[in-house]
Image (spheres, helix red, strand yellow):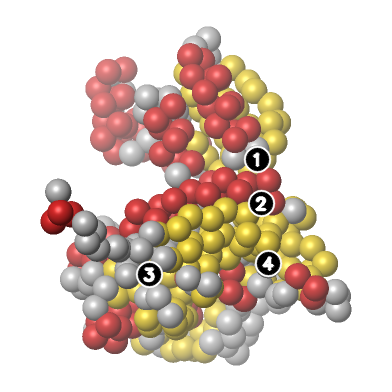
């Protein structure tokens, strides 16, 4: 039990129970099995972390599973087939200390003039170029962005600064994806993909604090799969890329398995929240007498909004959550367009469930009515599904009261 704790907790436990540090270290040596003797096998090393150094390139942290690696060896990354020469290898004790060779079971670092973190992804396998391993270590998969949003600079002349800032962040963060995007309402910007909401918030904060950028961030959205009538499947992260209704057969949206931990006093409000967000209730277990775990299957699109804020609000901050993506399901989804003065605004378009289209459209039109300044003519604001208007508001024209001076 003590092995899994950090050093401070281990020392605290040993002080309470009268156990010395020597006894703890002896227990680790006795109970933790040694690595297998695979020195003669081809090299297989697992990458578990990497970071970008401005002078040496990407520094890779790895554990040698089979074989050995020497300084100067020509190596190959098995996932992307990239080849490098190990200019420097070493161990961490705790700072980086150079070594000539690392054997099976040892953990160390590697510098090979790698230019991008994307070339040394976590979970990849390192092997020798000349004597390659037959198979890579299991468990590797590329990071797939699940949440997308648009980043637009507040000032148009900051577009190049935003591009440069995103490029620098990508050196350290291989999971960050971005591509140029233009909008008639907000100008030029980028469509960015993130692993989740926390990843999105961290990137946003770093752009604003480290690079002094003023950004407009569109509402987060998810990747939908559109099954077309010609049997093709199209992935759509932006409502503007959605095929026409006549060309699509069905739309699939990602679902997550979400586990909610809450005191028993707040089970009712949280179950109500799950039903409002199209959640499918699975089970409820009591972990302790006063704490329960609720499990729901929930559309990811319903969670990337204010779900976490609502969860904390309804439980007075006591509830917590954990989620994992489980796959895609076919849903009755439609594209909701916003028209201002008869012209569609693509930046405000969104993909919503058909049952929620009226509620979302009504809220959008009412909010736009408050935000858009009045003009000398009447401006209709409409929420449409195709050619059908489902919600409408109107900005009245500014009129001069010519009779006000008479009274």
Depth check, mark 3 against mark 4: the one in front is 3
Q: In this view, does 43 lie above or below 267?
A: below
Q: Where is residue 258 in the image (x, y as percent from the top left)?
A: 59, 39
Going by the picture, which residue comes out furthest to the front? 406
At 48% from the left edge and 55% from the top edge, which residue is drawn?
A: 393
Query: Mark 1: which secondary structure?
Result: loop
Q: Name the residue under label 4.
A: 386
Neighbour tally class for label 1: few under 14, some 14-19, many 20 plus, Cα within 10 Å: some
Q: Earlier in the sequence, mark 2 or mark 3?
A: 2
In the rendered structure, the answer to whether residue 305 lies left or right of residue 286 reads left
**Residue depth check, mark 2 versus mark 3: number of the one nearer the observer:** 3
Q: Which of 223 and 154 is in front in this view?
A: 154
Callout 3 crowding tier (Cα within 10 Å): few <14, some 14–19, many ≥20 = few
* Circle 2/circle 1 CB separation < 8 Å: yes
Q: Within 10 Å of the Cα at label 2, are there few (<14), some (14-19), or many (20+) other Cα atoms? A: some
Badge 4 marks a residue whose secondary structure is loop
Q: Is residue 179 among the parts visible in the rendering?
A: yes
Label 2 or label 4, whichever lies nearer to me, is 4
Mark 1–mark 3 distance (CA, rounded to whole Å): 41 Å
Q: Where is residue 244 in the image (x, y as percent from the top left)?
A: 72, 74
Marks 2 and 4, Cα distance to the nearest angstrom? 14 Å
Tag on residue 278? 1
Quadrant assignment, res 176: bottom left
Q: What element carries label 2?
A: strand
- Which of the labelled discs sits on residue 353, or is there none? 2
Of the numbered discs 1 and 3, the one sitting upstream in the chain is 1
Q: Name the residue under label 3.
A: 377
Report how far apart the C-alphas of labels 4 and 1 lie in the structure: 24 Å
């Amino acid at each position: 039990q003590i092995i899994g704790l950090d050093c401070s907790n281990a020392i605290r436990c040993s002080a309470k129970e009268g156990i010395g540090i020597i006894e703890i270290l002896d227990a680790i040596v006795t109970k933790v099995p040694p690595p297998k003797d695979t020195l003669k096998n081809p090299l297989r090393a697992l990458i578990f972390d990497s970071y970008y150094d401005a002078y040496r390139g990407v520094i890779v942290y790895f554990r040698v599973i089979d074989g050995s690696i020497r300084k100067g060896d020509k190596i190959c990354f098995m996932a992307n087939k990239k080849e490098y020469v190990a200019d420097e290898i070493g161990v961490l004790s705790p700072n980086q200390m150079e070594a000539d060779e690392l054997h099976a079971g040892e953990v160390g670092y590697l510098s090979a003039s790698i230019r991008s973190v994307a070339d040394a992804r976590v979970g990849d396998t390192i092997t020798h170029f000349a004597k390659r391993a037959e198979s890579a270590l299991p468990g590797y998969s590329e990071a797939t962005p699940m949440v997308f949003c648009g980043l637009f600079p507040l000032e148009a002349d900051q577009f190049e600064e935003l591009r440069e800032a995103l490029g620098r962040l990508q050196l350290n963060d291989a999971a960050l994806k971005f591509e140029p995007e233009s909008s008639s309402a907000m100008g030029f910007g980028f469509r960015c993909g993130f692993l989740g909401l926390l990843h999105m918030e961290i990137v946003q904060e770093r752009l604003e604090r480290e690079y002094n950028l003023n950004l407009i961030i569109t509402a987060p959205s998810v990747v939908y799969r559109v099954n077309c009538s010609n049997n093709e499947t199209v992935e759509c992260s932006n409502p503007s890329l959605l095929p026409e209704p006549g060309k699509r057969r069905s739309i699939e949206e990602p679902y997550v398995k979400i586990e909610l931990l809450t005191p028993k006093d707040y089970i009712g409000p949280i179950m109500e929240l799950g039903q409002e967000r199209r959640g499918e209730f699975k089970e409820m277990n009591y972990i302790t007498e006063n704490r329960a775990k609720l499990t729901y299957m929930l559309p990811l699109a319903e969670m990337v909004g204010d779900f976490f804020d609502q969860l904390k609000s309804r439980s007075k901050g006591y509830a917590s959550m954990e989620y994992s993506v489980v796959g895609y399901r076919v849903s009755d989804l439609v594209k909701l367009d916003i028209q201002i003065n008869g012209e569609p605004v693509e930046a405000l378009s969104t993909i919503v469930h058909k049952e929620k289209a009226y509620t979302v459209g009504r809220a959008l039109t009412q909010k736009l009515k408050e935000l858009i300044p009045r003009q000398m003519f009447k401006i209709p604001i409409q929420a449409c599904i195709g050619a059908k208007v489902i919600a409408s508001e109107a900005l009245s024209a500014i009129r001069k009261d010519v009779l006000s001076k008479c009274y």
